[in-house]
Amino acid sequence: MDDLITHPELLFSAELLDRYPAPGARYSSYPTPDRFHEAFSEQDYALTLKQRSGQVATRALSLYIHIPFCASQCSFCSLSTVITPDRSQAVRYLDYLGREMALQAARLGGRQKVSQLQIGGGTPTFFSDDELAQLMGLVRQHFDLSPLRQCSMEIDPRTVDYQRLQAFKALGFNCLSLGVQDLDPAVQKAVHRNQSAEQVVQAFEGVRALGFAAVNMDLMYGLPLQTAESFDRTLVQVLALRPDRIALYSYHHQPQQYKAQRRIAEQDLPDNATKTAMLARWALRSAGYVHVGIDHFALPDDALAVAKRQGRLFRNFQGYCTQPDCDLIALGVSAIGRMATSYSQNASTLDAYYDALDHDRLPVVRGLVVSRDDQMRRTVILALMCHGYVDFEDLSQAVALDFAGYFAKELEELRAMAQDGLVVVDKQAVRVTAVGYYFLTVIASVFDRYRRTDRMRLQLAQVH
């Protein structure tokens, strides 16, 4: 195997991956969705909408729409999806999305201005062009898109051609994300996602020719049958295209939680030494890309990289974005939204989602009101995830507390991480190192009170 210490930006070994496994949470919110509870009801959410509608000056508003359908399921999937070849399901779902928009808009007191719109899934391109046009028509009917700066959608390269891309551009989309994962045929077969390099190139070149503002490509390492060499071949092909952004996700095998992953044979998964070798290949190949955070990279002139340099980077349920901290309306089955100091999540099944709307109720089934402690910890976690550092004095002033005193236990834990080269801790700040950027979720989890409590309970249980 190649020497793993071959690049100055990736000076870590497989032992670090063993010592610091990812906590599972990606901290697109804090507290994380696994802490939401059913005591937060549809009435609670409706109240937050009413409070926003009564405000003279409100926070910016973002809109997320979840399309759960996929014609087939990838074995690595950990998303909320509905697997069906029946395209007619889109027609019914579209009708109910319209109903949910109407209920949300009514409780907001009319057409609120939206500055960011994202459509994810599932496979949003499961919808036909006409259905996507109808969806955008419903959005414009119930929301004011005049200040819209970013309009993005995830696409499956297997479902689009140049004509479809033209339709997306005409509908107002300016950012597209292409699901690639891996281009090796053996790996694709192992994860039930057969997608030729020609399909990816054709989709990418169409996006470029049409002048979309940004194009992202999703890659994944740690998949079954992947090797450092096979992954390197994928990197060579993808990086030759120079997408504006690349999301380099690590596959986490959790078959107990995600049914689709049970089709993957554990003996086919690469070990941590191989995964580290894949990251080393990435570091060698990706010169010129800015490490935005965790597993996201961007070209220096891309809006995400610019926001990173200017300290404007933010993180929400759809990942890193240039939109500042704002309220988020989430539409569709299982969608998660944020309003002021609360989070909400819709019903996770189509039947429950449809039933709520049939009774003229918002389909919110659980959520959380953020406490004072949650807000302070969220501020710290966001600072780490978006900027890679926490200035003690600035944070103390922002949240009105003695940072070093309040987070004494957390700082002690970070000092242990400093010995492994993940962070630098002094009297003024915590700074994430180049190596630490690959472990951002691990570093951020130090400030996660809920996970700390879980660890303490587990330790007590083991003692008794």
Image: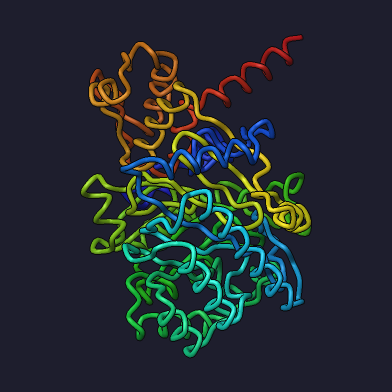
128 or 450: nearer the viewer: 128
Q: Is residue 27 visible?
A: no
370 or 315: nearer the viewer: 370
Q: Is residue 458 above or below residue 234?
A: above
Q: Is residue 20 visible?
A: yes
- Left/right of residue 222 with respect to residue 322 in the rendered view: right
Quadrant of the image occupied by residue 128: bottom right
- Left/right of residue 193 with respect to residue 217 in the rendered view: right
Residue 226 in percent (x, y) is at: 60, 62
- Left/right of residue 338 with respect to residue 293 in the rendered view: right
Q: What residue lies at 39% left-to-right and 13% top-to-bottom?
A: 406
Quarter in which the C terminus is drawn: top right
Q: Is residue 58 above or below residue 139?
A: above
Quadrant of the image occupied by residue 301: bottom left
Residue 93 in percent (x, y) is at: 68, 67
What number of labels is visible? 0
Q: What residue lies at 57% left-to-right and 40% top-to-bottom?
A: 45
